[in-house]
Image (spheres, helix red, strand yellow):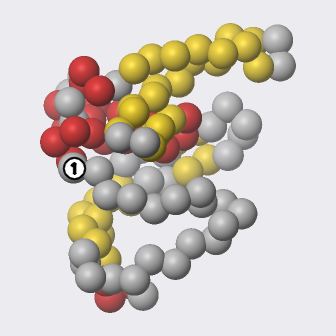
Amino acid sequence: GSENIKPLGYLDTYQTGSGFRIVPVVGIVDPTAETLIDPQEVAAVFEVPLQFLMTPGNHRLESREWKNRTRHFYVMPFGEHRIWGVTAGIVRSLYDRVYGA
């Protein structure tokens, strides 16, 4: 429940290429809290050290053609996981906010 999360603040609204508007919330999550996911929305839940996410050398910019347009997006490979798309874009916006890039 919400008692397991201590909100710290908000990032700027993130607009997806498919038209969704997301308001990212940054918070501290109790590491003993149970994680429940909707398998239709979330493939996996895993922890990544903040230092890894805040290291720009781990932010790869890739592009793909989609609906006759070139789309650019961040990819942050971490072990067997591939953080990409909206998730990586939100992490990058946190990096930009913290480090003023």
State whether residue 97 appears in this view: no
Quarter occupied by residue 76: top left
* Residue drawn where x is 21% and y is 49% of the image: 49
Q: Is residue 10 left or right of residue 88?
A: left
Q: Quadrant of residue 29?
A: bottom left
Residue placed at 59% from the left, 14% from the top?
Answer: 63
Residue beneath disc 1: 49
Q: Name above or below for residue 85 compared with residue 22.
A: above
Q: Is residue 15 visible?
A: yes
Q: Position of residue 39 (x, y in %)?
A: 66, 67
Which residue ends up furthest to the front in the rendered image?
80
Side of 5 where 34 appears, left or right:
right
Residue 47 lies left or right of residue 74; in this view the side is: left
Amino acid type, label 1: Pro
97 displayed left or right of 46:
left
Mark 1 is surrounded, within 10 Å at the Cα level, by few (under 14), some (14 to 19) or many (20 or more) other residues, namely: few
The residue shown at (73%, 13%) is 65
Which residue occupies the foreground of this view, 90 or 84? 84
From the top left corner, tell me how far across and down residue 51 is, in percent.
16, 42
**In the image, residue 81 above or below residue 27:** above
Where in the figure is residue 43, as x and y percent of width and height?
59, 57
Which residue corresponds to the image point at 45% horizontal and 62% vertical from the top-left? Answer: 45
